[in-house]
Amino acid sequence: MQNRIDHVAIIMDGNGRWAQSRGLPRIKGHEMGARAARRIVEAVKARGIRYLTLYAFSSENWSRPKDEIEGLFRLLERFIDEEVDRLKNSGVCIHIIGDLSRFPKLLQDKISLTVEETRENTELHLAIAMNYGGRDEIIRAVRKIIAQGIEGEGLDEKSFSLLLDTSFMPDPDLMIRTGGEWRISNFLLWQMAYTEIYFTDILWPDFDEKALDEAITWFCSRQRRFGMTSEQIEGRLP
């Protein structure tokens, strides 16, 4: 039986290196990365996958040069201005995971408006991770437990998952990281317990439909164990 994909998560790595290899400023790589994101959103939707999470800005990215961060914010604002109507009309529901409190007020307002205007869409749930870190997300969930006075006996994996930013969607089936790095970089630490992880040397601006299909083909060839032995999967052991 072919593996089913409900949720793909992507670490979009390699924008800066793409630009530098061409003698261009790093922000140009981020601009081309935004185009790649637009292309992959449509490709994922066309393949009937219901959930897509894109790692756009990590909680560690604040250490980048100030001008690059400000350029990223301007790029995000422009992306929202240009894409919100198209996303709304194409059935894409936007979700934001992460802590937006450090972002400029104008950007926060634009993000909130985009989330509200696409709330009723159901064809594709697009989660954008912004100022997101897996450890930070878990700490924020623990703070909710303390604030709500939840006792230890009333807490299990399911109830804890409902306190996370991703409570509205299933855990990722497939995580793709572009750019040649072999690590998960504090991304969806809780959620990726049994995710199949695919690494590619392709830099994010060059990642296209063909590369996506190669990742999906690889995923479909995997035997997903979920902590079980091959004998258990095949039904020979309880």
Image (tube, rainbow, N blue to C red):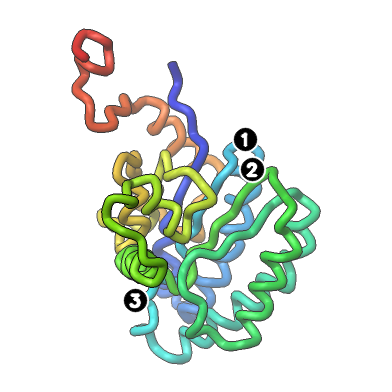
User: Where residue 33 sits: x, y (%)?
Assistant: 53, 64
Where does label 3 land, which residue?
Answer: 60
Q: Up-down: is 169 above or below 134?
A: above
Report whether 123 appears left or right of 234: right
Where does label 2 land, which residue?
Answer: 45
How many residues crowd around disc 3 within 10 Å: few (fewer than 14), some, or many (20 or more)?
A: few
Q: Nearer the viewer, residue 145 or 83?
A: 145
User: Residue at left 40%, top 62%?
Assistant: 13
The answer, for residue 17, to whether it is visible in the render is: no
User: What is the CA distance from the residue labelled 2 to the residue labelled 3?
Assistant: 29 Å
- Residue pushed farthest top? 236
User: Residue at left 68%, top 77%?
Assistant: 110
Q: Up-down: is 65 above or below 85?
A: below
Which image quadrant is residue 237 in? Answer: top left
Precedes in sequence: disc 1 or disc 3: 1
User: Residue at left 35%, top 43%?
Assistant: 198
Disc on res. 48: 1
